[in-house]
Amino acid sequence: MINVFVVIGKVLEKPEMKETPNGTKHTTLLLNVERGFRNSEGVYEYDQIAVEVWRASAETVVDYCKVGDMMGIKGRIQSRTYQSQEGNAFINYDMIAEKVDFLSYK
């Protein structure tokens, strides 16, 4: 089975370091990613994609990443199931980075 995603996009906001209760460092990298096709008006649209970055990679991203930097991310998609207070079941998908590349610096 294969569970891989690859995105290249520009950083939309400065990432901040967070820690789990057991001390594992992580951050969320918000990227503006251009779609690979034009809309009906001939314009490229963008998606904002949040990617979770963990441990040493998170430290590097927080220390060196700036708004506008071009980043390449390879990772996996992780799902979590939860229930609302009304009893409805939902699935949430998280993008987890496994490799982070700085493609440009601003």
Image (tube, rainbow, N blue to C red):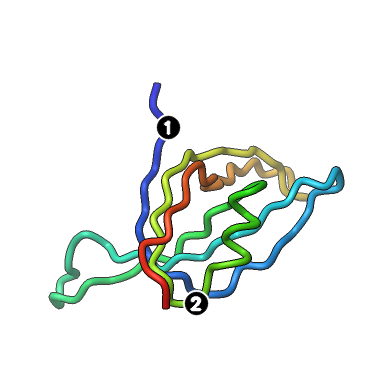
Residue type (three-letter) at the residue carrying disc 2? Val
Q: Is residue 106 left or right of residue 28?
A: left
Image quadrant in which the N terminus is located: top left
Instruction: Farthest residue to the top: give it.
Output: 1
Separation of residues labelled 1 and 2 (CA atoms): 28 Å
Instruction: Of the two numbered discs 1 and 2 on the same chain, state the one appearing first in sequence.
Output: 1
Q: Residue at x 59, y 50 (%)?
A: 57
| Residue that badge 1 annotates | 3
Residue type (three-letter) at the residue carrying disc 1? Asn
Q: Nearer the viewer, residue 73 or 93?
A: 73
Q: Residue at x 49, y 40 (%)?
A: 77
Q: Residue at x 85, y 43 (%)?
A: 22
Instruction: Find residue 66 and report its horizontal and vertical position in percent.
Output: 52, 74
Q: Residue at x 19, y 69 (%)?
A: 39
Q: Is residue 80 left or right of residue 83?
A: left
Task: Give the label on residue 27, or none.
Answer: none
Q: Is residue 32 left or right of residue 35?
A: right
Q: Nearer the viewer, residue 56 or 85?
A: 56
Instruction: Find residue 31 and report its horizontal and vertical position in percent.
Output: 45, 65
| Residue that badge 2 annotates | 67
